[in-house]
């Protein structure tokens, strides 16, 4: 999880904003097997601020709109894993 958090927010990165400090988001909950391997680095705004606006939308509670704007969580996870392999 430390290596993932060092990547910074994956959405901000994809938006060309460079490194933005992040929180860890578990895409399939925290208690399932291997849950800590299925995580995304998201900044507070993209993770859980709970707002939807023209600039950003948070994953909680707007999963559908979040994925519409930024891509499916599974695709973002693939990107995160590729970045980790390159590091």
Image (tube, rainbow, N blue to C red):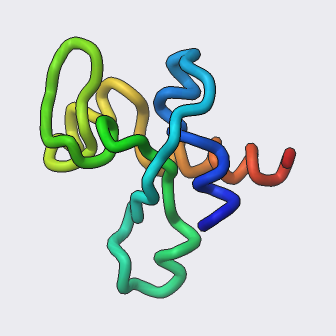
Question: How many numbered marks have been drawn onto this rendered protein structure?
Answer: 0
Quadrant containing the N terminus in the rendered view = bottom right
Question: Farthest right residue?
Answer: 86
Identify the image quadrant of residue 37. Answer: bottom right
Identify the image quadrant of residue 26. Answer: bottom left
Q: Is residue 28 left or right of residue 48?
A: right
Q: In this view, does 42 lie to the left or right of 37?
A: left
Q: Nearer the viewer, residue 10 or 75?
A: 10
Residue 28 position, x and y percent, is: 37, 68
Q: Is residue 62 left or right of residue 76?
A: left
Question: Farthest front residue?
Answer: 21
Residue 35 position, x and y percent, is: 47, 76
Q: Which residue is drawn at 74% across and 46% down?
A: 82
- Is 58 located above or below residue 84 in the figure? above
Q: Residue at x 47, y 32 (%)?
A: 11
Residue 71 position, x and y percent, is: 42, 33
Q: Residue at x 43, y 54 (%)?
A: 23
Identify the image quadrant of residue 5. Answer: bottom right
Q: Which of 49 and 60 is in front in this view?
A: 49
Residue 49 position, x and y percent, is: 20, 42
- Is 30 located above or below residue 11 in the figure? below
Q: Residue at x 50, y 61 (%)?
A: 39
């Amino acid at each position: 999880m430390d290596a993932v958090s060092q990547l910074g927010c994956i959405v901000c990165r994809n938006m060309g904003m460079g490194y933005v400090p992040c929180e860890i988001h578990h895409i399939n909950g925290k208690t399932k097997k291997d849950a800590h391997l299925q995580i995304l680095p998201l900044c507070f705004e993209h993770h859980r601020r709970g707002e939807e606006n023209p600039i950003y939308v948070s994953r909680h509670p707007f999963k559908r709109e979040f994925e519409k704007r930024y891509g499916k969580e599974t695709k973002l996870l693939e990107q995160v894993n590729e970045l980790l392999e390159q590091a």
